[in-house]
Image: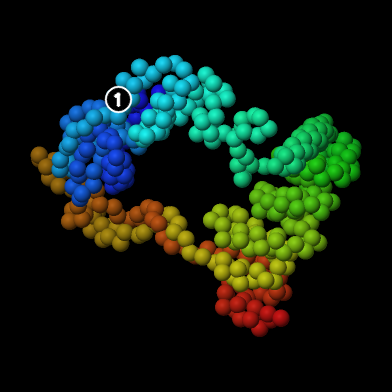
Amino acid sequence: MANIMSTRTERIPLACVALSGVLLSVGIARGDVFHLKGGDKIEGEVLDNLDDAYRVRTLVGIVDIEKDRIVKREKGPSPWRHYLRKRKKTPLTAEGHYELAQWCREHGLRPEATEHLKQVIELDPDHAEARQALGYVKDKGKWGRPRSPKAPTDEERKARRAAKAEERLLRKLISQWFVKIKSIHRGRMAKQKSGMQSKKFRKAREQLLAIRDPLAIPGLTGVLSTGDLAARGVLVEALAQFDEDEATMNLVVMVLLDPSPDIRRLAAIELLPREDDRVVQHLRDALANQDEKILRNAATALGVLKARRALEDLVSVLSTEKLTRVRLSRPVYFGRIQGTFGGGCRHVCGGHLRYYRPTSIGVLGPGSMVGTATGYEDRPVSVYRTEVQEALIAITGQNFGFDADAWLLWGLQNNG
C-alpha cells in the first residue's frame, strides 16, 4: 500500500508541516500531537527516536522533527495502525474494499483510499460509486475518464497525425538528398589533385548547382561545409540560389565562422542582394560577442553590406583595452657599478696569491641580478581593430583612422 512502508524521509520546513498539522488536528486524531515553539503543531505516528529528532509519519510524508523545537508531546492513537488492523479484517469483496476506502477518506488516508477503490473496480468493474470516486463518467453505457479541457479534439489528433506523417516523408527526402550529395562530393570533389580545374570537380559543381529543391539544403550544408576551400566555395554558390531562410541562416553563419576570409567575403557578397534587415541586425548583435574572431568577422561583413545603420555599433568596438600578458626586459642599473668596482684582484691567502672577483653586490643580497632582468606581467594593452576601421571606410567612403569622435561626428552630420 502506498505510503505505508515508505522509507523516504525529509526535513520539511516546519512552518509548512505545522500548517498541515493544524488543519489535520480538526476531527479525528492523527497520532501523537507535537506542539512546537511559536504555536504550531504537527500530528503523526512516531517511527523512530533519533538522537536529536523524532522521525514521524504524517499525512504529508515522513519528516524529522527536531527535539529542541518541541514544547509538548501528546500521545494519541495512530490512524495507520488502526488502518492495518482494519485491512486484515476486510473481506476480499468489492463492498469490503469500498467500505475500507470510505474509512480511509474519512481519516485522511487518501492514497490508501485510492488503492482500495482501484481494487473495488478490479472486483466489480461496474461499481458506480467507486468509478465516480475515481473520476470516471459513464457515456453510452461505458465507463471512461472525462475529457480534459486541454485534451485535443478528434480533428486536432487527426491533424497532428497528418503533420507527423508529412514530417516523416520530408525527413526521408532530406536523407535521400544527403546521401546523393555526399556521393557527389566523395566521388568527384574530395582529394582532387588538380582541384577546381579537374573535370571531375567541374562536373560535380555543375551537378550541385543544378539542384533547386530546398530539401537539399541540409545535405548541401552538412556535406560541403566539412570540405576544403573549393567545396565550401561551391556551397556558397549553391546557397545563393535559394531564397529560403534556411539558406540565409547558413550564409550568415559562414560569414561569422568560416576559417577562410575569402569564403566569408564571398558569403557576405551573396547576402547583399537579399536586402534582409534581419541579417544586418544579427551581424550588429555579433559585434558584442566575446569571441574576438566573430566580432571582427561581423564587422567585415557589415562593411561588405554597407550597413549604414551599424555605424555607431562599429565605432563602439573600433578599439578596446585588454589585459594582456607581455614580456618585459628591464635594465638593472647597478650592473654599471659592479662593472666599475667589481673587477678581479689578488689576495694573499695561505702564503699564495689568490685571484678573487666579487660575484654580486653584497648589500643587495645574495643572488641579486645585475644587467638585464626579463619577466612577464599583465598590462592593459590598447587593441585597434583594423577590420572595424575598414568596414567604416567601406560604409562611409571616409577614413578617420581610429578617431572614434570623428567617425561619430561624421555620422551625425550625414545621418540623412
From the viewer's perspective, tell me whether residue 315 is left or right of residue 166: left
Q: Is residue 151 above or below residue 315?
A: above
Q: Position of residue 401 (x, y in %)?
A: 61, 73
Q: Nearer the viewer, residue 394 or 47?
A: 47
Q: Nearer the viewer, residue 156 or 264?
A: 156
Q: Nearer the viewer, residue 70 or 199?
A: 70
In the image as oriented, which residue stretches furthest toward the left?
A: 350
Q: Residues within 10 Å of mark 1 (few under 14, many from 20)?
A: few
Check the picture and name the quadrant holding the N terminus. Answer: top left
| Colour treatment of the image | rainbow
Three-letter code, disc 1: His
Residue at (31% x, 20% y) in the render:
85
Q: Nearer the viewer, residue 8 or 33?
A: 33
Q: Is residue 193 above or below residue 317?
A: above
Residue at (77% x, 35% y) in the render:
165
Q: Is residue 399 above or below residue 193?
A: below
Q: How many marks?
A: 1
Q: Position of residue 271 (x, y in %)?
A: 76, 58
* Label 1: element kind: helix
Check the picture and name the quadrant holding the C terminus. Answer: bottom right
Q: Is residue 113 visible?
A: yes
Residue annotated with mark 1: 82
Residue at (29% x, 24% y) in the render:
81
Q: Position of residue 127 (x, y in %)?
A: 54, 26
Q: Position of residue 252 (x, y in %)?
A: 70, 54
Residue at (38% x, 30% y) in the render:
104
Q: Is residue 143 above or below residue 289?
A: above
| Image quarter of residue 99 | top left
Q: Is residue 171 visible?
A: no
